[in-house]
Image: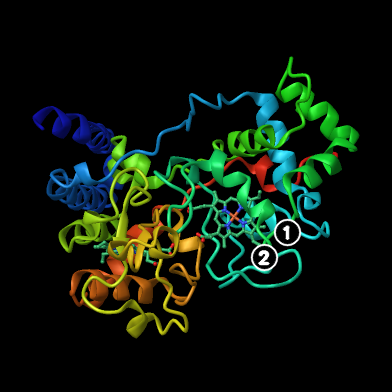
């Protein structure tokens, strides 16, 4: 603990030393700067015992079974943006998980290939490769398994079967080339397993570090005092019992509605039973995967059914139904400020459709 404390404080000490050597004209400004730094450091001291709940976002999301190569990523990137992955050539993965909009479409429910709406809100694909399981109910184990599912889902991309899509892609020159490059030495590289692997390899690149990671890396000033206060409240009131680790979630299933039915607060029309609908195990009723809170300020509307538009309201509901706690106005504003510091970004080139598509 001592060791962590010192390595954590070091950048701050360096900065204040630099400031105190300025000329006298600047001394008033220096005083306010110094006071600000001191206040900022005070919060580091109180936060240091809570840092174990948080984690730095890793810079790579490797998979032993599906090693990332530049060729696979190129193929996956192309497939991700290609409308030909839907029955009537109308939508791609990017339609519902728009990479120029933090990996979401901003809608409560997303229209599929035939215009029909799904029953759950589209979560972001950013950092999804790090989730312990995929989907709100965890019915896919990783991004490799998940990537094949929306394509065949009748409400989403509505491709009738794997062979239909493989036949379609096999006629396209671009894919003959890209699959052969991504899976060298394979006699029939255009197949469904490889399609899933390539899309997943691309998703494994969608990692969005934010200011929180700079802070955890030792840059004390990467978070404002208000954000630090929010981080403190987030830990003190118990949000971290479910939203923890590098993703602030993504690693457990929890009941939505620990202290009262969630729909009393969200006004949800449908009472989605969550993981129960997948496992049919009574103990899983109303359990959902705790979502990651990375980029949460950019991914409204909230909850599995997109029933809540406003982040402050979502935070208030969480405190009430999960912790039986009423946040005061300050706590709410500070927690929301902290959540905003979790917005990161992905490489610019991925936000555009690939050349040649
Ligand atoms: C019509 C909209 C739509 C399309 C098209 C679509 N998705 Fe999704 N996606 C969703 C919805 C809705 C969910 C959540 C469903 C659930 O949890 O039951 C989801 C979930 C996911 C998840 C899980 C994320 C998490 O937090 O658990 C990933 C990853 C994902 N989609 C990737 C893809 C990829 C890759 C494609 C293209 C092959 C794709 N999606 C196509 C709507 C869509
Ligand atoms: C007992 C576990 C638990 C606790 C404690 C908890 N959450 Fe959650 N949180 C969840 C689950 C589960 C969901 C998903 C609910 C759903 O949509 O079905 C969620 C969803 C959210 C969402 C919406 C995310 C999105 O993408 O839609 C936000 C924001 C959030 N929580 C913030 C908080 C804050 C802030 C606190 C503390 C005041 C908190 N949570 C406490 C389990 C928890």
Question: Which quadrant holds residue 55?
Answer: top left
Label 1, residues with CA under 10 Å away: few <14, some 14-19, many ≥20: some
Residue 328 in the figure: left or right of residue 130: left
Q: Which mark is residue 102?
A: none
Q: Quadrant of the N terminus?
A: top left
- Between 342 and 219, the residue placed more toward the observer is 342
Quickly name the residue at label 1.
158
Residue at point 18% right, 74% down?
325
The reply to whether residue 357 is visible in this rendering is no
Residue 43 in the figure: left or right of residue 113: left
Residue 132 location, x and y as percent?
39, 43
Q: Is residue 309 above or below residue 15?
A: below
Q: CA distance from mark 1 to mark 2?
A: 6 Å
Residue 326 location, x and y as percent?
20, 77
Residue at point 23% right, 55% down?
240
**Quadrant where ligand 1 appears:** bottom right
Mark 1 in CB contact with mark 2 (< 8 angstroms):
yes
Question: Which quadrant holds residue 114?
Answer: bottom right
Tag 2 secondary structure: loop
Which residue lies most toward the top here? 185
Residue 4 location, x and y as percent?
17, 31
- Between 28 and 18, the residue placed more toward the observer is 18
Ligand 1 is within 8 Å of the C-beta of the residue at disc 2: yes
Residue at point 58% right, 40% down?
203
The reply to whether residue 134 is visible in this rendering is yes
Residue 290 location, x and y as percent?
35, 57
Question: Which quadrant holds residue 278?
Answer: bottom left
Residue 165 in the figure: left or right of residue 210: right
Residue 139 in the figure: left or right of residue 50: right
Quickly name the residue at label 2.
155
């Amino acid at each position: 603990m001592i060791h962590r404390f010192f390595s954590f404080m070091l950048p701050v000490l360096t900065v204040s030393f630099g400031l105190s050597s300025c000329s006298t004209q600047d001394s008033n400004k220096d005083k306010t700067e110094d006071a600000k730094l001191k206040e900022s450091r005070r919060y580091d001291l109180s936060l240091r015992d809570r840092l174990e709940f948080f984690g730095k976002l890793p810079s790579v999301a490797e998979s032993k079974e599906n090693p990332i190569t530049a060729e696979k990523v190129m193929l996956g990137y192309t497939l991700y943006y290609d409308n030909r992955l839907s029955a009537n050539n109308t939508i791609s993965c990017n339609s519902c998980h728009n990479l120029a909009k933090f990996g979401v479409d901003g809608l409560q429910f997303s229209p599929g290939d035939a215009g029909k709406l799904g029953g759950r809100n589209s979560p972001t694909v950013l950092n999804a490769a790090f989730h312990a399981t995929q989907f709100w109910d965890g019915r896919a184990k990783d991004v490799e398994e998940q990537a094949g599912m929306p394509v065949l889902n009748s409400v989403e991309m509505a491709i009738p079967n794997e062979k239909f899509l493989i036949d379609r892609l096999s006629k396209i020159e671009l894919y003959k080339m890209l699959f052969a490059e991504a899976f060298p030495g394979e006699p029939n590289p255009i197949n469904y397993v490889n399609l899933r692997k390539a899309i997943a390899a691309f998703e494994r690149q969608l990692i969005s570090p934010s200011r929180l990671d700079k802070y955890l890396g030792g840059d004390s000033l990467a978070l404002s005092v208000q954000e630090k206060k929010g981080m403190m409240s987030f830990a003190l009131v118990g949000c971290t019992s479910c939203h923890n680790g590098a993703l602030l979630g993504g690693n457990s299933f929890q009941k939505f509605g620990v202290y009262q039915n969630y729909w009393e607060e969200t006004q949800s029309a449908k009472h989605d039973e969550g993981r129960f609908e997948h496992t049919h195990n009574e103990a899983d009723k109303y359990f959902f995967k705790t979502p990651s809170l990375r980029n949460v300020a950019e991914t409204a509307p909230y909850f599995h059914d997109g029933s809540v538009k406003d982040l402050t309201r979502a935070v208030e509901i969480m405190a009430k139904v999960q912790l039986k706690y009423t946040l005061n106005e300050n706590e709410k504003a500070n927690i929301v400020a902290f959540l905003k510091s979790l917005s990161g970004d992905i490489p610019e080139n991925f936000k555009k459709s690939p050349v040649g598509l």
